[in-house]
Amino acid sequence: MRFDTDPYLTRYADRVQGMRASEIRALFAVASRPEVVSFAGGMPDTSALDLEVMEEVVASVIRDDGATALQYGGGQGREPLRELLVEVMHHEGVPGNADELVITVGGQQALELIAKCFVDPGDVVLAEGPTYVGGIGALSSHQAEVRHIAMDADGMRIDALEDELARLASEGRQATYLYTIPNHQNPAGVSMSVERRHRLAELAEAHDLLVVEDNPYGLLDFAGQTYPSLRELIPDRVIYVGTVSKTIAPGLRTGWIAAPAPIRDKLVLLREAADLCASNLTQMIVERWLTSQPWREQIKRFTEVYHEKADVMLGALDEQMPAGVTWTVPAGAFYVWLTVPAGIDTSDLLAKAVNHRVAYVPGRGFYADGTGGSQARLCFSYPEVARISEGVVRLGELLHEELELVQAVFGDTAPQARTRHEGSSGSRGG
Ligand code: PMP
């Protein structure tokens, strides 16, 4: 059967009414063709894993304890895994104990359960602008009003947060929580400075604010640097989200929440209502990986791969981008956040880009309020090194052509006449 309009429209719950597949999804189907260099998907490079080793890890779980692996488990997740994930947190200096953790199906389920736990329709949730698409999705599906807090090279601007908190107070409202990705943020590619973390902690205390600290990328710093976590600074106010998606593999769909005990208990009830429990099989694979493999070295290997790819992308951007285009300089993880001159709309440009055999994610996807038309996220973690420069060359050619068009229409007042790389931000290792 084919539906041109949706005959079930009046039947959906209110929370579903506003949910729509984005029009760029169709373009992404084209973007996954092999001739297109895709900087779109935020995917780790799983080819950096030794699959023979993984095969043995998976086989050994079934061989040694198959009956348990194929059985139901508890809602909080397996204790041996929680104990091992605490070690992963400690490797980054994040405090925690196994009792505080709830295992989830990736960080994404964690974000969804947290939204379900706290957000009533119309509640205000604060988030960096831009922020993670899936974070916005989890919040929108619970009808949150997302208000963005501006960022710069040092992460979330605390003066902007202070302004928003004052605005809320003047409206007689309180934010349900603040959602932040302090380390190597998706999509901005920058980290929150240490000083700002302390100021954020003070503000949270002063305004009785809960904070959701989403940390998939903290261990992927190119220089091996780690930052103090908000969980360390204000443990009673922080709901911390971790995942093995970027440090082992996303196909394992294993993440976790570390939360104060009363919140943890509610989250366990919500997760049992959603899917009973995480898969014992994948939990035990992660356990086996963490107990039998040199996982710290594997993470180092991942960061070396991403560091090289970041260097290639940044070098190519320097060579290929027309004047007036700016970008952030990541010190870890996957992303470069690009800003193009006024007159170019990155959503409109995507179809042409795919024709030029290069793809990115338009900036609007990272805002709940429709802004971001001058931005784009370039993800360098997945394409092969040689293809990264090729993709940037194609994007550079397209932007040169577009800017000529803008120039033809606006003449000397064209915005690209301003200085090169103005506003370029972030610093390697900083
Ligand atoms: N948070 C952020 C900031 C992310 O970038 C991602 C994945 N790209 C996730 C959470 C969710 O990842 P997963 O469900 O694979 O753990």
Image (spheres, rainbow, N blue to C red):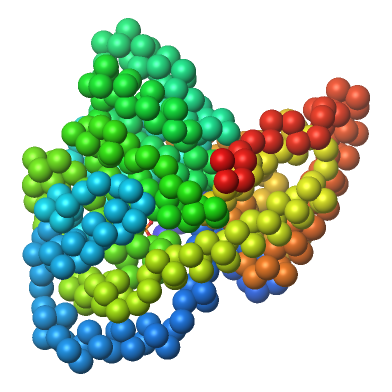
- Among the 4 quarters of the image, the one containing residue 98: bottom left
* Horizontal arrangement in the rendering, residue 344 relative to residue 41 (left or right): right
| Ligand 1 sits in quadrant | bottom left
Residue at image position (16%, 80%) is: 69
Residue 92 image point, x, y percent = 36, 52
Residue drawn at point x = 33 percent, y = 88 percent: 56
Give the camera-side residue of 338 and 330.
330
Residue 94: image location, x then y, percent: 30, 47
The image shows a total of numbered marks equal to: 0
| Quarter occupied by residue 326 | top right
Quarter holding residue 243: bottom left
In this picture, residue 251 sits left or right of residue 4? left
Q: Look at the image and tell me whether residue 385 can be seen.
A: yes
- Compared to 199, does 300 lie above or below? below
Q: Nearer the viewer, residue 124 or 263?
A: 263
- Please report the residue visible at 45 percent of the width from the left and 44 percent of the height from the top: 183
